[in-house]
Every structure is written in C-alpha cells, then in structure tokens.
Image: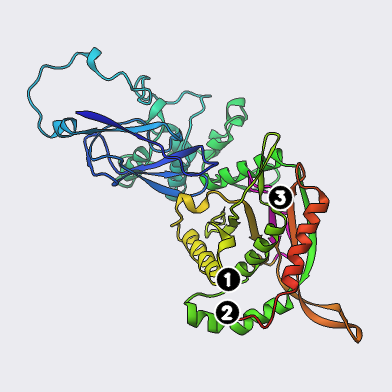
Amino acid sequence: MSIVDLVMPKMGESIMEATVLRWHKKPGDKVEQDEAVLDIATDKVDSEVPSTAAGTISEILFQENDVVPVGAVIARIATGAAAVAPSAPEPVVAPAPAEKPEVIPYQPTSPPPQELKAGNVRFYSPLVLKIAQEEGVGMAELEKMPGSGQDGRVSKKDILQYIADRQQGVVSAPTTPQTETVAATPAVVSAAVQVPAIQSFGGGSGNVEIIEMDRMRKLIAKHMVDSKHTSAHVTSFAEADVTNLVLWRNKVKKEFEQREGEKITFTPLFVEAVVQCIKKYPMLNSSVDGDRIIIKKDINIGMATALPTGNLIVPVIKYADQLNLTGLTKRVNHLANAARQGKLRPEDTADGTFTLTNVGTFGSIMGTPIISQPQVAIMAVGAIKKRPVVVETEQGDSIAIRHMMYISLSYDHRIIDGALGSTFLNAVAKSLENFDPSRGI
C-alpha cells in the first residue's frame, strides 16, 4: 500500500501557476499510468496532466477553476493494495473522526451555502460567467443561485443544473431589472469583475456594453503591463526595400508547394534575416537577471500568432539558427496551424529568446510592440506596400515603383542603447534588401 502525489508540472521557464479546467477523474476512479487525469490552462496553452502511476484516485485537492502553483500536490493516487481496497468493501467498524486524514486544506469548512446577504461580494469564475452569458442568465439569477463550491461559490455543475431546472419550469427567471444588482457601493466598485459577462446598461451618457475578459485576455493584459513596468521600452524604425524578396517568393511559391507540400510565406524569410543578424549582435538574444546580463547561445524565435478568438499567442521556433529555409517554413506552418487549432503543447511556447510579430498581416504599416519578458527585444514588420521611391543607379538617380516595408524594434534600454538597437535594426533591413533574387529553393 502506497500513496503517490500527483503534482502540478512545470511547463516552462516563466510559468509559475496553472488553472484547473476540468477533472477527468474523481475519487475512487481507477487510472492508468500516463492516462489524462485533468485539463489545465496556463497563460500560454491548455494541456492535459497525465497520471504518474497506476492505481485509484484517493483524493482531489483542488476544484475546477482553482489557480494552482507549479509543484503543488493536486491529487493523490493509491497504488498497490490501496488501489484495490475501494472495489472490495468489507463490513468494518465506523472509523473515529480522529482517524480521518488531516490533509483537507482545500475542502470547504464553512457552513452549508446560505443565501447571499445584501452588500456581500460573491466570486464567479470566468467559466461560470461564460455559461451565464451563453444561456442568458443575468446577475440577479446568479446572486440567488445556491452554490456547492467553497464559500458558497457557484460551480459549473450548479449553473448547469440551474439551467436544466429552469428549462423544465422548476425555477423561473426573476422579473426584477438586472440593473438593481449594480449599486454604487464600495463593495461593488472593488469587485468590478462580478459584472455579468455581457450586459447592456441604459442611462448616463448612453447605452454601453460590458464584456467580461476571458482568462487568456486577462493574462495577456497582465503580462503587457508587467513588461512595461519591467523594461525601459524604446522603439526604433527603419524602412526596407523588399522588392527582390517579394519577386523571388512570387516566382518560387508554386514550385515550393509542389515539392515540399507547404506554402512558403514571408515569415520564414523574415526569421532567417533576424537569425543572421542576431549572430552578429548576440546582445539582442539575451535577458536580464538583476545586475547580470545573460546572453543566450540558442536562438529561439517566438512568432506572435493571432487566434480566432482575437487573442494572441507566441509559439517558439526552437534552434532557428540550425534550420534552413525549408525547415523554417515547415516549422512556422506547423506552429501556426497548431495555435489556431488549439493543439500547441506547453513546450511549444517556452524558452523564446527573441520575438517577431507581423503587424502587416492585418494591414498595419508599422507598430511599437511590447517586449515579451524575459526577452530584451521584439521586432515588428509592417505591410508591404508598392511606393514610388528614389533608386540610385550607375546612370544616376531615378524614380521607380518598389515594394517597401517598415520594420520596428522595441528593445530594453536598460542594456541595449540606441546605437546597438538601431544598428541591429538596419542590419536586418539591409539583409532583406540584399536578398538574392536568383537564389534556389
């Protein structure tokens, strides 16, 4: 008989906690080694946590929607004799209360859920608010809904049961206006997230719509603010004539797709230029640890990718300096598709050392991106536009129609001065401008 602790795994250098999304098992269920026990979500991706041993789930220490630090015990698995005991009950003397396990810090110790008193602030998880939004459950109904979670919290099970009862006519929606729940009291002001997911309000300067941020949007917002508080941001700009690059891609893209089964986009070409310049200026591939500068020998390029939800995620091309153009293309396409389909693994978004974001995908000609911590720089490429420009030739200056693109570099001024930042940026621009139009594939 032995008990194995299932702990929250570490899923990346900067990931310190994860949210429990859903348990696949409950106490008493059998589980095989490597079988998925629960789904978790980090600020990067959603993933499954497999069992580290075969046996029976003896205890679950966290509920759905709880935020759990990395390394914390989330469940216990009984193996050997302990695993088979639940399936063979025998008449025994009722155990004394003192013999019950003492490790119950995550079980509710408060009295049974009571009706919320006026002025109290009640917590609703993003999942509950999302279900309420989709099913048309207003704040007035949520406040009167009995909860079986810790401190009377309404769980997913509670709201789904409520909705089922309402559809069967067991309960009915309140007829009082929902705006009664939004009172100008300090309790409500300090808990603005308790507003229902989507709700329209009248009066004041006009109608407004309040939309509850989803979990990923909250995390993105926090990371962006934290980055601004951490790094002294400076952004430099450059212009690149990418005519040769555009013409070359147009010439080879059909043949490339037929040969490799992959579409070649501009992204791997940009990544290739960035990698070449990082090798010349390795300080751009570093991080700051107190008063120390840590220069990374591996070049792992993060590529900002927009999701169908409108949120942003940054999968990482590991060891980008060791890949040729074909390898970069396949890796870029794989990560982009996995991101849009929600199939990224935690390791796919970890250990980035420099980030590239293509703001031109959505028509922007330039941008001032925010550094992805703990990196020290991020580059943005804008939309490629045809413009008349002055071209220097042996016969003299002339005006020609060229494919032009703005690129920008946001960097951490604590360790990268304007001279180095601008030099690196212009090196990337020159690399793109000097692209060999006769290059093979």
N-term mark: 3 or 2: 3
402 up-or-down from 126: above or below: below
Q: Secondary structure at mark 1?
A: helix
Q: CA distance from mark 3 to mark 2?
A: 31 Å
Q: Are marks 3 and 2 in contact (CB under 8 Å)?
A: no
- Residue neighbourhood size for the residue with mark 2, other residues' Cα within 10 Å, grouped as few (<14), some (14–19), many (≥20): few
Disc sitting over residue 283 in the figure = 3
> Label 3 amino acid?
Met
> Label 1 amino acid?
Leu
369 up-or-down from 161: above or below: below
Give the x, y percent position of residue 230: 69, 38
Q: Nearer the viewer, residue 357 or 293?
A: 293
Q: Which residues are magenta?
A: 364-380
Residue highlighted by disc 1: 325
Quadrant of the rendered image containing residue 271:
bottom right
Q: Is residue 246 left or right of residue 90?
A: right
Give the x, y percent position of residue 351: 55, 49
N-term mark: 3 or 1: 3
Disc sitting over residue 441 in the figure = 2
